[in-house]
Image (cartoon, rainbow, N blue to C red):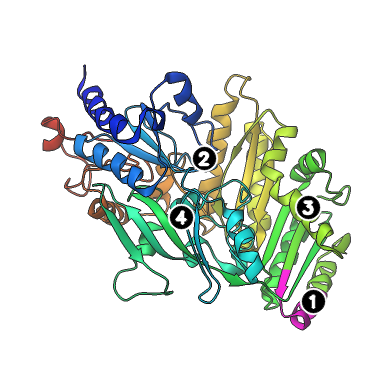
């Protein structure tokens, strides 16, 4: 038996008696259900799965992995789109979906305390009777879990005005890589000293596992107005977005979909978006009723000036929900028009929208693949969906190459390789497009402070992972821990 197999057996020998056989899965047929997250092009069947039902079970699993130097990966609902929850074939997958208690709703302090398996939308459902809600709203909010939102620093349509998950988490209980539990932050917005909560949010599971989160809740606005505007070209829609922001308006959301995405959505959920539109904008405004009325009139004027072919303001909550249903269903709906698709996530300056979208179209023609564009236009967060057929030889590889070129295009335009989906496995090789070797070494040292053994979600985020204690710069020779059999290079 090789070293990694013996170490895994030692972990299982600890966990099965402690947690029970039903909580530790090793049957190959059961393990296959966990071999990927929402990015299905990256797959790896874990050696074992732990179905944790409380924070102590998470800590026990992490402690056993740390003691025997077995890598572990945390997973929530599995809706991530960057391969961040892809398991290790020689490691343990710790699943937190059973930790789904809402522990407290504190309306006086506008806080919720929840376990990591709580579904995003359920926080708002629980807070609604108190006139409150949880602002981050990923498209998968009806199924994605808070633990995953914390790991990836998830955003959503309303992050233009309200920010990302990191702006709405004030405290965390975390199990770090040695199995100990640490409390970061609390109920206050800020604490003196290092921002450890901000460091942990968006760390993609490389610093440990969150077992409890304290979330900020916001007061429901007095008025909400949702406007749907159609355009005969993406350039016109992009010009409308720029005009809205230049006017000094700050909508809660500005979303855009192109013709391919619109066609898919109509097939899937029949939202009755305007026929023949090359692009539609969904603009939502919220706040005091008088202010919303004024801002809605201004948005309507600016859309008309940019060449809008039709404008409709939702008159009922049902109409508003139908408009949003199309946008929220867009990713899944693309399955109606393509056997497979590759979701990308990059950021560009708003002013670069027309140029970058034109270049994406050119790249699609060059690769012989269609690209559907669905994105948070207000903050320039693009979600191009590269359509392909995995049954056609070479198309999956071309789709991945095209997605990479789109990321390079985003960075060249002054943007980023990710807005809200994270880096994970999918984009780690593109990190040097944005960061120098010194930048990456600094990030790695932070990771080592939390996880000196490198067992927490190894192989993610960093383009050239190294053992903690290794000298910065290009790897030189064999690390002593590797030579002694006490550590692996992931």
Quadrant where the C terminus is found in the figure: top left
At which x and y percent is residue 460? 38, 42
> What number is the disc on residue 150?
4
Query: Which residue is denoted by mark 3 in the rendering?
Result: 279
Q: Nearer the viewer, residue 264 or 400?
A: 264
Query: Which residue is denoted by mark 2 in the rendering?
Result: 78
For marks 1 and 4, give the CA distance. Answer: 36 Å
CB under 8 Å between callouts 1 and 2? Answer: no
The secondary structure type at the circle numbered 1 is helix
- Which label sits in the foreground, 3 or 2? 2
Q: Earlier in the sequence, mark 2 or mark 4?
A: 2
Q: Residues within 10 Å of mark 2 (few under 14, many from 20)?
A: many
Instruction: Based on the picture, tell me whether residue 453 belongs to the magenta stretch.
Output: no
Q: Earlier in the sequence, mark 1 or mark 3?
A: 3
Q: Nearer the viewer, residue 244 or 184?
A: 184
Q: Earlier in the sequence, mark 1 or mark 2?
A: 2
The region drawn magenta spans 285-297
Judge whether residue 459 can be spotted in this image: no
| x 23%, y 40%: residue | 66
- Which label sits in the foreground, 1 or 2? 2
The secondary structure type at the circle numbered 2 is loop
**Residue 2 quadrant:** top left
- Which label sits in the foreground, 1 or 4? 4
Q: Vertically, is 323 above or below 8?
A: below
> What number is the disc on residue 283?
none
Q: Residues within 10 Å of mark 1 (few under 14, many from 20)?
A: some
At which x and y percent is residue 443? 31, 55
| x 63%, y 19%: residue | 391
Query: Which residue is denoted by mark 1 in the rendering?
Result: 298
């Amino acid at each position: 038996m090789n070293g990694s197999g013996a170490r895994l057996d030692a972990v299982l020998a600890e966990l099965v008696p402690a947690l029970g056989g039903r909580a530790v899965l090793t049957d190959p047929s059961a393990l296959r259900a966990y071999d990927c997250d929402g990015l299905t092009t990256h797959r790896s069947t874990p050696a074992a799965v732990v179905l944790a039902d409380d924070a102590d079970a998470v800590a026990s699993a992490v402690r056993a992995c740390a003691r025997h130097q077995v890598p572990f990966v945390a997973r929530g609902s599995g809706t991530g789109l960057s391969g961040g929850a892809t398991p290790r074939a020689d490691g343990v997958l710790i699943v937190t979906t059973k930790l789904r208690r809402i522990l407290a709703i504190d309306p006086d302090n506008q806080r919720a305390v929840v376990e990591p398996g709580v579904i995003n939308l359920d926080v708002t459902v629980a807070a609604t009777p108190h006139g409150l809600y949880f602002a981050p709203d990923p498209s998968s909010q009806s199924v994605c879990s808070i633990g995953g939102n914390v790991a990836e620093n998830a955003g959503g349509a309303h992050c233009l005005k309200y920010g990302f998950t990191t702006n709405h988490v004030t405290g965390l209980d975390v199990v770090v890589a040695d199995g100990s539990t640490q409390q970061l932050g609390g109920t206050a917005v800020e604490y003196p000293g290092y921002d450890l909560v901000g460091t942990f949010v968006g760390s993609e599971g490389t610093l440990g596992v969150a077992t409890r989160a304290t979330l900020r809740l916001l007061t429901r606005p007095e008025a909400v107005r949702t406007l749907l505007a159609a355009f005969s070209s993406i350039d016109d829609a992009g010009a409308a977005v720029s005009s809205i922001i230049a006017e000094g308006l700050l909508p809660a959301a500005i979303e855009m979909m192109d013709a391919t995405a619109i066609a898919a959505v109509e097939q899937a959920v029949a939202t009755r978006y305007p026929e023949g539109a090359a692009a539609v904008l969904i603009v939502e405004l919220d706040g005091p009723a008088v202010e919303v009325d004024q801002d809605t009139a201004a948005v309507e004027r600016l859309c008309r000036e940019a060449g809008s072919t039709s404008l409709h303001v939702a008159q009922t909550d049902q109409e508003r929900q139908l408009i949003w249903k199309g946008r929220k269903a867009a990713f899944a709906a693309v399955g109606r028009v393509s056997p497979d698709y590759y979701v990308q996530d990059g950021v560009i300056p708003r002013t670069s929208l027309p140029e970058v979208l034109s270049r994406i179209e050119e790249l699609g023609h060059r690769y012989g693949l269609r690209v559907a564009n669905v994105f948070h236009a207000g903050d320039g967060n693009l979600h191009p969906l590269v359509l392909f057929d995995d049954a056609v030889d070479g198309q999956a590889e071309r789709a991945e190459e095209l997605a990479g070129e789109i990321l390079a295009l985003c960075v060249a335009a002054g943007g980023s390789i990710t807005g809200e989906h994270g880096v994970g496995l999918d984009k780690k090789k593109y990190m040097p497009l944005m960061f120098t070797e010194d930048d990456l070494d600094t990030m790695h040292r932070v990771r080592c402070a939390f996880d000196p053994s490198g067992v927490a979600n190894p192989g993610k985020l960093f383009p050239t992972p190294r053992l903690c204690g290794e000298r910065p710069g290009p790897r030189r020779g064999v690390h002593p821990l590797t030579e002694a059999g006490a550590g692996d290079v992931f």
